[in-house]
Image: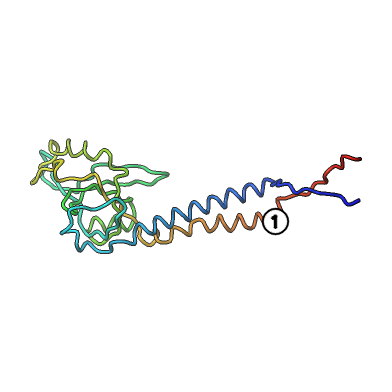
Amino acid sequence: MSDFYERKFMPNVKHIIAYVLILLSAVLFISGVYRAFRVTGRLSMEGLVFETEVHKGDSILLSSKPFKARLKETEHTQDVVWKTVLKGIMTDYDFFIVHVAYAYRPVMVKKGTEEYDKFLNGEEVTGYFTEKNFDDFPQFVSDMNSVYELNKEITDKNYSTLGIVIVNRQKELLSFLWGVPFLVISIILLKISGTPFIYTKIADDKE
C-alpha cells in the first residue's frame, strides 16, 4: 500500500528573517519611487510668478535667498531662522522663510549639506511643497511682528503653511535602491535555508 504525505509550511528562523527583509525592501522601494516622483515635476521657477496656487507634493527648483529681518533694538539684518529641529541622530534642520508663489512660506533644509549652503547663497536647490512640519508657522508669524523690524508686515493674508522641504535631488531619485541590500540578503537567506515546506506522513486509520 502506498504511503500518503501532506505538505506543511514550516519556516525556520532564517526563513522568517528573509520574509521580513523582503517586506522591508518592498516598503523601501515603494517609498523610494514616491520620493523620486515627487522631485521630477517642475524643474524651474518659471511660471510661479503667474500662479496664485501651488499644491502639496509639487516640486520646485528654488533659487531664492531666505527672508531677512532685523531684530528690534539691533542694527544688523539676518536670515530669519524661526526653528531648528533635531531629527534622528545628529541631524539638524533649520527652518527659514521665502517668498514664493505670492506668499511667504516656511522652508526646511538639513544643516551641514551642500543644499543648505546653496540655499543661503540663493543658488538653485530642489524642493517639494508640503504642510508637514510647519504646523507652528502661524504662531511664529503672529509673534514675529513684535520681535522683528519689518518693512512689510507678514499677516495671515500673505503667508501660507504650505511650505517647502529642500532635498538632494539625486539622492531622492535613487532612493528606491535603498531596499536592494535587504532584498539580496533575503535571497541569500532563502537559498541557504532551503525549502520552508516539510512532508509528513498521513496516518492510516486502518493501522
Residue shown at the point (35%, 58%) measured from the top left: 168
Q: Nearer the viewer, residue 59 or 110?
A: 59
Q: In the rendered image, which residue does mark 1 sit on?
A: 192
| Up/down of 48 relative to 56, above or below | below
* Residue 45 place in picture, x, y as percent: 22, 61
Query: Which residue sits furthest front?
Result: 206
Horizontally, is 141 left or right of 129 in the view? left
Local packing at callout 1 (Cα closer than 10 Å; few below 14, some 14-19, many 20+) is few
* Residue 47 place in picture, x, y as percent: 19, 62
Q: Which coloring applies here?
A: rainbow
- The amino acid sitting under disc 1 is Ile
Residue shown at the point (16%, 39%) measured from the top left: 144
Q: Nearer the viewer, residue 85 or 102?
A: 102
Residue shown at the point (35%, 46%) measured from the top left: 92
| Up/down of 73 relative to 198, above or below | above
Horizontally, is 94 left or right of 36 in the view? left
Q: Quadrant of residue 65?
A: bottom left
Horizontally, is 150 left or right of 196 in the view? left
Q: Quadrant of the C terminus?
A: top right
* Residue 40 place in picture, x, y as percent: 34, 62
